[in-house]
Amino acid sequence: MSAPVGSETGRPAAWGAAARLIARWLDQGERIDALLDGLPPTLTGAERARCQHLVLGVVRHFGRMEVALQRLVAHPPRFTTRAALCVAAYELIEAASGSGDTGQVAKIVHHAVEQTKALASLAEARLVNAVVRKLIPAMMVPPPPPGASAAQLAEYFSHPEWLVRGWLGQFGPEATRSLLEWNQRPATVYARWRDGGAAVPPFLKPTRWNGFFEVESGHWREVEPLLKEGKLYLQDPGTRLAVELLAPQPGETVLDLCAAPGGKSLLIADVMKAGKPASAEAGAGKLVAMDLPGTRIDRLKQNLARAGDLTVALVQADVTKEAAAVFREHHQPENYAAVLIDVPCSNTGVIRHRADVKWRLQEGDLKKHPHQQLTLLHAAARLVAPGGRLVYSTCSLEAAENDKVVADFLRGKAGEAFTLEASAVSQPWVTGHDGAGAFLLRRKG
């Protein structure tokens, strides 16, 4: 169950702050992670957590809300009022998953009306009062029965119908429903403990994935300093698949392509350092991270700075444009024992964490991405030393972005120099963490 509906406390209340962010999202289409990063610092603790919960809940269930509101409101109201309706609708969905008692529903309606008076106007508050009461049955209906059509599943579980149709064809009805249910639940926060010499704090709950812990709610004050000190890193266990296949070794020179924001770079560095004998005089090896210049480079620099005694280098360039010449210019090797390329993709494996992905994704993207991914894979292959390893990875569930790209590469002339040694695919409703695909290719010696 969620926290009870908040009230104004002299700082921006969670409900009102959430409605303002949703209004901006509706109006300007900003990315949700960027919106949440911009929350006022005065919104702290439980209020901040509740605000984030409401915003992400609205985005997850937005399709279902939109269909219901279109049936109830002839002309869309202003973005602020529409956002207030959405926040109230999400609270009704929450109530339906709990007791759904009449008293709680009445409080949701009353609170939405009072908040709208402050956010918009008295007239719009009256509209909210009337519409939210009519939303109650629509938001509290049970899920569609087994055998439901793509359209029914798409509406109830708030996903684009074209995406649901594709999953039904790829995974079948039972797995597709499990995936939709997975995407609609709030994401578990996972973290990787990096300080091997210190005891793991008790509020970090062990998982079945070595080194990864579940961060239980209510401990952000303890978590924040650990993040700043570099002892803890927020990271989903799904990211480990590509690095485990790459198996970076101490003393190797490793290349991480499309590296920003650097979560996998840092994991590679930690693996290499952990494998170095304490008595060894030589360093743990070298890691070169490469990506295009852009807003995420700062995060990549921060993560590389945490690599400890591992030698690191950052190259800001396009790997598809004369990469060997770029590396010579930066005094870096032109080929590597191990190369990881985590390509841009549809992100369909991480919708639970990135709730707005499904609304930004277009059907044509699943045809456009594989062409770009194959180009990137060819570019990465040129940088692998004889006998070296190349891992191609995505956070996509789509076969077109995973198996098919690798198969197309191996059928081509460049692919004749490689063999596929292993692969790992995470279906999140099965593995319990983000979806991902990872494929280990080895250049023939």
Image (cartoon, rainbow, N blue to C red):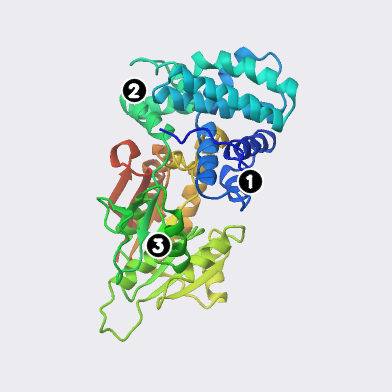
Q: In this rendering, which labeled residue sits more in front, label 1 or label 3?
A: 1
Circles 2 and 1, Cβ within 8 Å, touching? The answer is no
Q: Can residue 233 be seen in this view?
A: yes
Q: Residue at x 68, y 18 (%)?
A: 127
Q: Is mark 3 on a helix, strand or loop?
A: strand
Q: For the residues marked 2 and 1, what is the alpha-carbon distance in whole angstroms?
A: 46 Å
Which residue is identified by label 1? 11
Quadrant into which the C terminus falls:
bottom left
Whichever of callouts 3 and 2 sits on the residue coming sooner in the sequence is 2
Q: Where is residue 389 in the image (x, y as percent from the top left)?
A: 33, 62
Q: In this view, does 239 lie above or below 32?
A: below
Q: Is residue 160 visible?
A: no
Q: What element carries label 2?
A: helix
Residue 173 got which mark? 2
Q: In this view, does 193 lie above or below 274?
A: above
Residue type highlighted by circle 2: Pro
Dot 2: few (<14), some (14–19), or many (≥20) neighbours within 10 Å? Answer: many
Q: Position of residue 254 (x, y in %)?
A: 39, 68
Residue type highlighted by circle 3: Leu
Q: In this view, does 8 lie above or below 154?
A: below
Quadrant into which the N terminus falls:
top left
Residue type highlighted by circle 1: Arg
Q: For the residues marked 1 and 3, what is the alpha-carbon distance in whole angstroms?
A: 30 Å
Query: Which one is nearer the viewer's eye here, 96 or 240?
Result: 96
Residue 232 got which mark? 3
Circles 1 and 3, Cβ within 8 Å, touching? The answer is no
Dot 1: few (<14), some (14–19), or many (≥20) neighbours within 10 Å? Answer: some
Whichever of callouts 1 and 3 sits on the residue coming sooner in the sequence is 1
